[in-house]
Amino acid sequence: MTRRTAMAAGLAGAAGAWVAGGCGGADGRDGTDGAGPIRSDAGRGLRAVVIGAGAFGGWTALHLLRHGADVTLVDAWGPGNSRASSGGDTRVIRATYGSFRIYSEMVIRALELWKAHEKATGERLFFPTGALWMSSGGPGQYMTDAAPVLESLGIAFTELTGGQMARRFPQISPEGITHALYEEGAGYLLARRGCQNVWRTFLGEGGATRLAEAAAGEIAGGRMRDLPLADGSRLEADVYVFAGGPWLSQLFPGFDPPLVTPTRQEILYFGAPGGRSDLTDAELPVWVEDGDALFYGIPGSEFRGFKVADDSRGAPFDPTRGERIASAEGIRRGREYMEHRFPAMRGAPLLEARVCQYEQSQDGHLIVDTHPEAANAWIVGGGSGHGYKLGPALGEMLAVQILGEREKEPFFRLTRFA
Ligand SMILES: Cc1cc2nc3c(=O)[nH]c(=O)nc-3n(C[C@H](O)[C@H](O)[C@H](O)COP(=O)(O)OP(=O)(O)OC[C@H]3O[C@@H](n4cnc5c(N)ncnc54)[C@H](O)[C@@H]3O)c2cc1C
């Protein structure tokens, strides 16, 4: 994969057309502003089991439930657990996606749903800091590609030179920055809290949950029969949705290329000097720099510190047994980058570090399809470092696909790997 592809599918990771195309067959909405979740009884009588309560499984289970299905959500370690890809403090939400209009549209819909969900549950999950994309050492093709997409979708953004950027954000050194793009409505989401909130909401609306480790069931006659659980019991349903994140390739080892490859990623939290609101989300947006490497950060991060991360794909990682200790080299690289771009952070101590994993698909794009041998077993994942934000829109899309109200999205199908 080239760095450009990795980035496109990578980090920082969009719905007029999306909503119209995606949900036209479903019934009315319950939001007062027309942006809320869709509810219908199209799923009445359908029994569904969703495996995985991360961003993808949790939202899919909730949307299926809201269409009247009888849904059980199963997770081995719980929603937003420390091993899960959705288990971090914060995740970026931005519609800037290079030329990938499909994601920009999904982000628009996802943001509507995140906001409606906040309103309905009374818990703040979205922080609108804006997102600043900086390009160094190149023409900033990703931004150049994104600009017409954002414009055509009516998403507010400003393009800046390095000098203009420095005047607007004096806490950032403009050295080497050739071009910047500031997306005003972007920001960050509280990730593991979001998963837990969705799990609670799902339970509150009548869904069933199980803390249990599942395996893929036997397939016969083009269908998956049931779902074996590690405690020896089985769950039987009409439809199974496997949203196992980085574990997807363990659930279904037979795919070539593998469904996903978990890659080791380090997240660093440095301590800013006291009282510097310009180094918090009060004044600093979510930022991304596309240069020799791709670094990004989220100020705020629940007061855990000044978050810095390198988006380069790390070594393959075992999400179950892997030890999560940051490397000296990763800390050195993160510090060196931070001190160069944010001079006020020179000498800042490392407060915390986390090791997480991307669930990288072969091309960095999502996988949303049925198993080639079982029409009732859906596989969803491949967020590849950019999936969290999409959760509500993805779950909405998948629920109506499962109910037969929408065709599968070709861009996300497994057949592209054939
Ligand atoms: C460091 C890092 C930074 C990221 N930054 C961003 C960002 O800024 N913006 C963004 O949008 N995205 C970002 N992402 C990507 C995003 O977090 C993921 O794509 C997304 O969270 C994946 O969600 P998921 O539901 O597919 O997987 P997970 O969140 O991993 O959920 C899978 C769930 O399945 C459960 N499970 C697995 N196997 C079984 C089994 N056999 N039985 C029962 N349960 C099982 C697990 O316990 C887990 O809870 C980032 C990811 C990482 C790691």
Image (tube, helix red, strand yellow):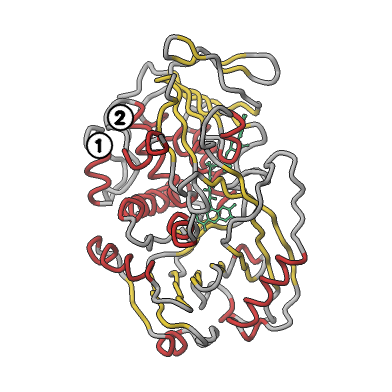
Q: Which residue is mark 1?
A: 28
Residue 368 position by quadrant: top left
Q: Residues within 10 Å of mark 2 (few under 14, many from 20)?
A: some
Mark 1 lies on a secondary structure that is: loop
Q: Earlier in the sequence, mark 1 or mark 2?
A: 1
Q: Position of residue 40 (x, y in %)?
A: 30, 29
**Foreground pick, 400 / 282:** 400
From what the image shows, is residue 410 above or below residue 33?
above
Would you place residue 232 above or below residue 276 in this image? above
Quarter of the view holding residue 144: bottom left
Q: CA distance from mark 1 to mark 2?
A: 7 Å
Instruction: Say what amino acid the circle numbered 2 marks.
Output: Ser
The image quadrant where one finds the C terminus is top left
What amino acid does circle 1 point to? Gly
Check residue 244 in the rendering and tell me which mark sits there, or answer none.
none
Q: Is mark 2 within 8 Å of ligand 1?
A: no
In this view, 184 is above or below 6: below
Q: In the depicted view, which residue is nearer to us: 14 or 415?
A: 415
- Asked if the residue at tag 2 contacts the one at tag 1, i.e. Cβ–Cβ closer than 8 Å, the answer is yes
Q: Position of residue 217 (x, y in %)?
A: 56, 17
The local secondary structure at tag 2 comes to loop
Residue 169 x/y as whole percent: 48, 84
Q: Is residue 22 left or right of residue 386?
A: left
- Residue 40 is labelled as 2
Q: Residue furthest top?
A: 221
Name the residue at 51% across, 41% down: 198
Relative side of 358 to 187, left or right: right
Q: Position of residue 97 (x, y in %)?
A: 38, 60
